[in-house]
Amino acid sequence: MTFERVVVTGGAGFLGSHVCAELLRRGSRVVCVDDFRTSTADNIEAFLADQRFELGVADVAEPIEVPGDVDTVLHLACPASPVDYLRMPIETLRSGGFGTLRALELAARHDARIVVASTSEVYGDPVEHPQRETYWGNVNPIGPRSVYDEAKRFGEALTEAFRREHGVRTGIVRIFNTYGPRMRPGDGRMVPTFLRQALAGEPLTVHGKGEQTRSLCYVDDLVRGLLAMAASDHAGPVNLGNPEEVTVIEVARRVIEVTGSRSPIEHVEPMQDDPRRRCPDIRLAQRLLAWKPEISLYDGLRMTAGSVGHVLAGQRLT
């Protein structure tokens, strides 16, 4: 499938900006919709001079108006960092719920294919391992993290309802831990936090014993999978993530290795409802999309460390 004109909600965010960059590289026209609540204009500054790139500053929870033809909608807008969604619980529910509704309405008006970005957080603290798309999850619906988890679960239900009732060509991807350049050093997620601490010579703060596991996918790999899903006609949900499972303490050690830091590791209180194990079963993505991650954790961390170091150097100069 050739993407002619694509609306990317949350297009100025970490993941969204990488998606915009890849679409432009492929020759598509891109409409980026973002309110910069958790993103930065720096992420899209390089695209502004490109005549194929349009920016619409708007709250996705309100009706989204995009004149002209649209063949694809990629709905990525939603605070994804615990720091952000714990600070903005209601806004997170609005963007995950009403924002998904508005994106689906936009796709329906334009008869466009829409892919909605869900999350591995819908599995909660899973009792099935690795997590398959058929697993219904083990989620605390009223805990502090629920504003993100339940917004995404509702968004999936809404997406399926639009597919069944209105015939909208929908797809759902469940994104596992993703990292890479353009992550904010202070956004609270594990990889940028560890890199910021290591580059500053501070202790790397590991919650609990660090035995909980994560599966880290480099952003370029994730973007390939997302666009492969958009080019298909599959409804999903489809897991996108790296099936290499690593403990949090091991990630901290690898960050110290790639940065050459002498920072110690410091154990702090565990986070409430923090999943103990997280690893995707990606056999469905391999079969339907011919997709799997290719970039190693070492190489991905090294490339991300350079980006975080550049941001920190700029902050010191201002």
Image (cartoon, rainbow, N blue to C red):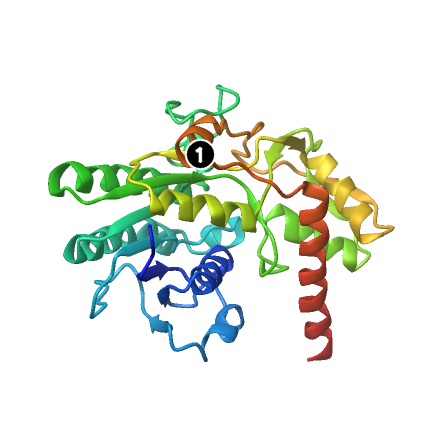
Q: Quadrant of the C terminus?
A: bottom right
Residue sitting farthest toward the right: 262
User: Is residue 314 positioned above or below 278 on the image?
Assistant: below
Snapshot quadrant of residue 57:
bottom left
Q: Nearer the viewer, residue 109 or 259?
A: 109
- Whether residue 181 appears in this view of the structure is yes
The residue carrying mark 1 is: 239
Q: Residues within 10 Å of mark 1 (few under 14, many from 20)?
A: many
Residue 41 visible, this orientation:
no
- Residue located farthest toward the top when viewing the structure as drawn: 128
Q: Residue at x 83, y 45 (%)?
A: 264
Q: From what the image shows, is residue 147 above or below residue 311?
A: above
Q: Residue at x 23, y 51 (%)?
A: 104
Q: Is residue 63 left or right of residue 88?
A: left
Residue occupying the point 60% across, 41% down: 294
Mark 1 residue type: Asn
Q: Is residue 59 above or below residue 192?
A: below
Q: Position of residue 13 (x, y in %)?
A: 47, 61
Q: Name the one closer to the observer, 101 or 239.
A: 239
Q: Is residue 179 above or below residue 208?
A: below
Residue drawn at x 79%, y 49% as measured from the top left = 258
Q: Is residue 116 left or right of residue 296?
A: left
Q: Position of residue 83 (x, y in %)?
A: 53, 53
